[in-house]
Image: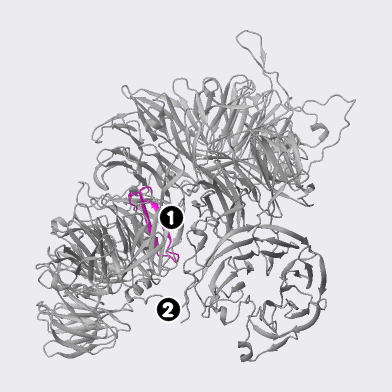
Amino acid sequence: MVDKTAPRSQLRLEWVYGYRGHQCRNNLYYTASKDVVFFVAGVGVVYNVKDHKQRFFLGHDDDIVSLALHPERTLVATGQIGKAPYICVWNSYTMETVSILNGAHHQGVAAMAFDKEGKKLVSVGLDQQSTINVWDWAKGKVIATTRGHSDRVFDIQFNPNKDNAIISCGVKHIKFWTLCGNSLTAKKGIFGKKGELQTILSLSFGDGELIYSGTMSGDIYIWTGINLSSVIEGAHKGAIYTMDRCDDGYCTGGKDGCIKLWDVDFKPITSIDIKDTNEGYTGLILRSVTWRGEKILAGTQNSEIYEITVRERDQPRCLIQGHAEGELWALAVHPKRPIFVTGSDDHTLRVWNMSDMELISQTTLDHSIRSCAMNSDGTFIAAGLQDGSFQVFRTKDLSEIVHIRDRKEVLHEMKYSPDGNYLAVGSNDNFVDIYSVQQKYKKVGQCSGNSSFITHLDWSEDSKYLQTNSGAAERLFYRMPTGKQATNREEIRNIHWFSWTCVLGPEVNGIWEKYTDTNDVNAVDSYFGCEVAVTGDDFGMVKMFRFPSLKKGAKFRKYVGHSAHVTNVRWSHDKQRVISLGGADHAIFQWRYLPDGIVNNDDDLPEQSATAFADSDSEDSDSDISDVGELDSDVENENQITYDRNIYKEDATRLKKAIKEEMKPGEKRLKAPNQGVKLEFVHGYRGYDCRNNLFYTQSGEIVYHVAAVGIVYTKDKHSQRFYLEHTDDILSLSLHPVKDFVATGQVGRDAEIHVWEADTLKTLSILKGQHQRGVCALDFSVDGKKLASVGLDDNHTIVVWDWKKGDKLATTRGHKDKIFVIKWNPHDINKLVTVGMKHIKFWTQTGGGFTSNRGTFGTVAKLDTMLCASYGKSDEVCFTGGSSGSVYIWQGLNLQKAVKAHDGPCFSMHSLDRGYVTGGKDGTLGLWDDQFERCLKTYTVKRSSLAPGTKGILMEDCPAIRALVLGHGHILVGTKNSEVLEVEKSGPMHILIQGHKEGEMWGLATHPNKDYCVTVSDDKSLRIWDISTEHKMVNCKILKKAGRCCCFSPDGKVIAVGLKDGSFCVVNSDTLEDMVSFHHRKEEISDIKFSPDPGKYLAVGSHDNFVDIYNVMSSKRVGVCKGSSSYITHVDWDSKGKLLVSNSGAREQLFFEAPRGKRQTMKNAEIEKLGWDSWTGVLGHTCEGIWPPKCDVTDVNAASLSHDRRLLATGDDFGFVKIFEYPAKGKFAKYKKYVGHSAHVTNVRWGHHDQRLLSVGGADTALMVWIHGDPHERLGCHGNSDTSDTESEEEGYDSDVSREKNMDYESKTYANPIRDTTGVKPHLKHCDQSDKPSVSRQAPEPTKVQKSEVSVSTAGKRKKTISHVQGLKLDYIHGYRGFDCRNNLHYVNDGADIVFHAAAVGVVHNIASGNQTFYLEHTDDIICLTANQNPKYQHIIASGQIGAFPAVFVWDSITKATLSIIQGFHQRGVCSVDFSSSGKYLVTVGIDDEHSIAVWRWQEGALVGSIAGHTDRLFHAEFRPDSDSQFVSVGVKHIKFWTVTGGVLTGKKGLLTPAGQGTEAVKMQTMLSIAFASNEVTYTGCMSGDIFVWQGTSLLRLVTKAHSGPIFTIYTSLRDGLIVSGGKEVGKDGAPIKLWDQEMKRCRSFQLDTGSTVDVIKSVCRTKGKILVGTKDSEIIEIAEKTGAVQTLIRGHSEGELWGLSTHPNMARFATCSHDGTLRIWDVANKMMVSKVVVSAAQCVHYSPDGQMLAVGLKSGEFMILQIGGLKVWAKKRDRNKTITDIRFSPDCKYLAVGCEENCVDIYDMSQGPSVPRICYCKGISSFVIQMDYSANSKYIRVSSGSYEHQVFEVLTGAPLNDQSVISKITWATWTSVLGNEVVGVWPRNADNADVNCAHLSHTGNALATGDDFGLVKLFDFPTAEKFAEYKKYVGHSAHVTNVRFTFDDTNLISIGGDDSCIFVWKTM
């Protein structure tokens, strides 16, 4: 037998020639120990210059392209390219991986940097978006992620002078980032006038705000803050690729090959031009420089590293050299000396010395070199070139001897003959040419016959033969030197080859995997002496095989480091070393060959981390391995089980939505039954494919699992408790080392792990999102903090969790075959071991990843499949059990010895204090000493060992043992046959639990008058169970074939069993002896039933589509029922025994007469009336309601009607047991459903008194017993499982609730124009300015706009004049967002201030002074706000906004500092925020389609968990005031009680009870608000005005009609527990505010006296003796509790667009009017509303110039004029029926101009008194009117319209004025237009879908204020005739700013928001 093992000898990497300079930068540093660190290919290199030694980091699997050095200069981070690139952080001293950062980048990691503390790492990707990630690198966790830029980013750095500041730069940009919470926000660098916009390549930092950057042009840009402040021009001639800062200053380097040194103030010190030194060359480009003290390191584009001493700067020393960019293929080794030659596509031929590791000489040729050869004494070198020619050189001085070109195409391979006489040259055009060396390389022969290019060739020892390989995988032989082909087999067999570098031929078959392409091994070289060959392949591997290796797929050792193709490998002349070349990475690796493997670490070998090489028998070679033990059938079956499901339970919720689609309008669903069942006992234990899943708790209870149930079993009571939160089969279970916490893992698409308490059965944590298909192994770490899990995906992914938080700590691919067990090392909390199919691996967790090593079997034993593992007393010792029955003892990674323990596989092992216990397939337990040296005692599980009186029967002796554990003086054993036994130390055994073995289970029947049932299954057994409180198996029988159905006779004396092969038998029910059997059918028998008493007939239904009827007495077949078109599924008799009903697989329900089987037809009414003996069918009109929607997918397998004919139980393919009212008529009847079974429930049956319900699971082999209890108890047992949609139909909807529910925020999110305009925007029009002579004799031009010398009289002193307006500062906001937001008003600062929001501003309002301060970071409407109640976090506010990806900002209400920004999860908007009791967590609710809920740790911005909340709108979510994990959400017909379990939010719906209101449960309402009391009591206010009181999750009682309308808000005072509620009250007598005691029994009412007919309260808050109230009408009111006195703090317009604004001509007042129907007058100085008049929806308003009148234009087309005194109507008129858009008094008060949407302006005469006659109108306006301005002399009016055109009309005639020369001389009284050449500069660049709405020129005439659809108020200089003029911008309004006006004296600017209905008052500066 050929030895197929891997060779004993090994390779170790000794040296790497080269440095990665191209396409990388800043990748060369000194470490703390003064070593040089850099990278090449996929290797991180640490080079000790003094000792001339290299150490290697080999943790990457592709090219490294970026490197960063930790500030302490020992740790290094390297980033790679690839599909799923990762970052490794490693220690440059020990070369060990410290952390792996994966899963966040694509394509590659372009640049990285540590922050100055070294805790965080920032990285930027090579993907399209240049994703930026900030990592907590030690944990391997992403803190924040964002899109960096649309183009490449070249450098990224943390700013050392500013916390959490990051700067990135790249193609044409530089960005300044701020990290806050989980979000990065960027400001673009402003290049301004100082420098041009260009690509920035490198960064460095000065002191304070200074930042230096190197550019493409060679300038250095200096930044202060985000502005370019100065430029050092021409610092370099060409791009500056690299900058480095050290204590002495800076150094820079770039394309010009110069290093420049600068002092700390960036003044030049010196420049070092390397290319002019003796080591340099022209065209040298620097990619990386670093300056430390005396020394400078420089890395070049062409792979050199120079070290320069500052004193001797003209003598750089070259430390490292390598080939430059271009593929590297050519390699030849000197035959006698340690010298080798390489040639590459960089056109150079280089000669290297391998003992000194240095370049000896080089020469540059004209073409790329693809092959080379040295002759037999090493004196000549031949090189084959790309153009088909070759050159020959002398080795000593590289002088050319000859240059010959015979071929056109590249020469791939050349070799001198061993005697030195000939040179063979193989080319791309399929020929080998033979040249004679003596005859000056004359061509003497040619080998033809290859059909493809030549790849390899070898000479024979006698130089007489040549063998070739071609690209078409041909191997041919030629006689030399003629080139004739040799084909004689004999002749060929006798050739002795001088070398073997061919990849084809029987000797090297083993290098090919079994089914591979023959192009992926590029090179071979063999060492005959040691019988080894090395290969290089396309996957970057260097491998070592035995030579010869004849069978494909041989074992090998493999070595990584090269990133892509290894193009060539060669042994050195003395076979001590191997040289390998990398194609794309153009690196040369030099390996040491160690013939006997590693002998006690050679001292002269570089140390290496263990990840560097797989010295094991590689997993990649899975040949028919004869040296591996044969597979055990059980192990093989287990390996092949698939856990894929066609349908998962979570699909049921998707189908639920379909119910609504399929119901006809008005169709009602049948109500659910009011009685239920609960799980009492489960027979079964999952042993056949699970292990180590059985434990004792500290109290002596036993935990295990079967189906989807976690079971806690109490032995002395023989009772069980159940954990029922899993949705599918549990496959693994682990017990916490310290507490009774259980972790269970299940099957599933996204398989979940639950951690729960054995005592209370409460879920502690749910871990999901990492595993697919299922979780097959779990283990808690020894301290219980971490949990490791293994998935069933193809890679068997391993994940380590912080299970309490639900965070994934680390993940890695496990193995390609199944892993059975994962175990933590109890002595080292970062180490684990996994065992599985032919596999044992030792793992070390490093940050977010792992490093791993395979266990080495060596010669101790053959590779075996490992099934269990346990650790010894020290961290190095580990024991594993194998499928051969041996126990393996490991020390470190090496196998020490193997001990035979069992016959057949050793499945389980458990460690004791002093020793071990093992269990095997042979059914024995062995007790061992602590060294596994001797077996102390064995126990065999067999019937004879059972203790007397044990519950149950052992089905067979010696069942395979799958789980065992010791505790409480006993050994607990779980077997493959689903038994749980307890063994006493003295030997007797007790059966505790048993169930059916593996195989589907379908047959179930109950005894007619005893508490017995019978089951049959595919495990070929029939079992009889006692289902009373005994819960045990009383009898069993092995059947000949698998059983599919069974039934008792009416007297219970016999049992009939239908089998899978078409036969059935009848047995005695006591002795189980066969009485009779028949075999009349070929297909399985699917149902069997005796006719009712006296049981004369037996009906047998089969899959042959027939029902046979047998006479029981005569044992003959008497009838056959034909007519079904498909297999029979159910058969039932009527109570007389005359009629038979059958169901078939084609959904037919047929009726037959017994005993002949004649077919009958029945009407629905008759079917219902007829008394049926049993009803187990699932078809017909009485069962219509049991079928879920879309039920082609899911079948209802079984039904059973209770004996009182009231309840129908069903079992379906989702694993649900459901109970319906019978008859279940109509579609989709409601039900109660119960979980426990995993996939199919195959059968259900009621017991003989309806006391119990039994169900069996198909694949899960479990028999579940459900108790139904006495009728009066039955109401109580509805588990948490009655969630059959309670869509109670709600009476009517309240208008305020429904508008909030249907609020569409998408249309409000930014920049949709608020008016539909048409035409070309002004800044896009072509305007021709008429050129005027610069000096003119004419009269001076009149001023454009009249200026008023504004003066303010300051109490009799000299008048002081206002200077120019320079800037604005927000002073006050009138408004509060009440109309669609709630609970957004809070006291802060002990009740001195209140905080609320308006528009996009968070407002802090001081009650005493009335002053406001503002938080202005939001970018769009805020729609929720909360204050942190925890005393540690006083003054902390969270507010959420709308937007495509809305953010939540957490900020300090005193300093206004942003503490955290949380973004990236919700969409459209965040409508609710609330802090937890500790103040550390925040819950947010989105208004996306899922109405998602998320919980955050806000300080780090980390998402704890998230979930889709509800199908309809959620309004609010609030934490319980005493909890960090429990919160409640309310919404449309929704209340849910949530718990944060680890990283998952689990919710339970509120359970509706009659709540003392009668017998029917209360209907579900739309819930609007939440409050809390102690003892898990929750209050929710609902739409009807009732308050629901909940205890836990059940409804306790109602507080009926707490308010007469919806209760929008309830507030819990934490101080005294009192509760304030606020609702909608109609009429004067209603009390909109009520203060309640803690129980909500008594209350006190408060009136608001706002004078409105309806009060709608949206927010309440309470502090010492004061209640704060926010109303829908945007008012904030404070009520004193003692007196009920009311004080209004804030007023504003209520909902409706706000457009009208006018300032008083000579007082600090202004008027506004809005679509809310009111006109209001405000006082600027006193910050208050002076008066309010209801007018109807109004659009515009104007003060007359004398301040006596106000004109208001309405939406209806009417306008009115009011007198200021008393605001009495003086006149009103309606000549139009569309909105009046602007209204203006003329400066002389004679005329009133009214502009409207009907495209015209009417002019009215004011002097005629209140009749106000129209004198003319201006027409010919192309669109609706926007703004109008009068000339100063009242003669002209300028009108701007919606089509972006402006026209001038004469006031008296309405005629248009078109003469430009006249127009240009007009002086205007005011300027409010956004059109015209004078203001073209106000239009922004990106105004495609947004307009500038309004403008106003200050009275001093220098400043123009505008408002636009982006929500910005801007200040421009006037006039702004240049496009895109500069401006100052001010934020705060959310979307559209509809109007702006300066007050009469320019001291303030007023701006109003359209949608946000807010009035902002700005102070001018």
Disc 2 crowd rating (10 Å Cα; few below 14, some 14-19, many 20+) is: few
- Residue type of the residue flagged with mark 2: Ser
**Could you say which quadrant of the image residue 1623 lies in?**
top left
- Magenta stretch holds residue 569: no
Badge number at residue 1813: none
What is the magenta range? 781-805
Residue at far right of view:
1337
Badge number at residue 844: 1
Residue 1871 visible to an observer of this rendering: yes
**Could you say which quadrant of the image residue 374 lies in?**
bottom right
**Left or right of residue 951, residue 567 in this image:** right
**Left or right of residue 1225, residue 515 in this image:** right
Q: Residue at x 57, y 25 (%)?
A: 1710
> Which percent across, then down, holds residue 1321?
70, 44
Disc 1 crowd rating (10 Å Cα; few below 14, some 14-19, many 20+) is: some
- The residue to which callout 2 is attached is 626
Residue 1692 visible to an observer of this rendering: no
Q: Nearer the viewer, residue 400 or 112?
A: 400
The quadrant of the image that shows the C terminus is top right
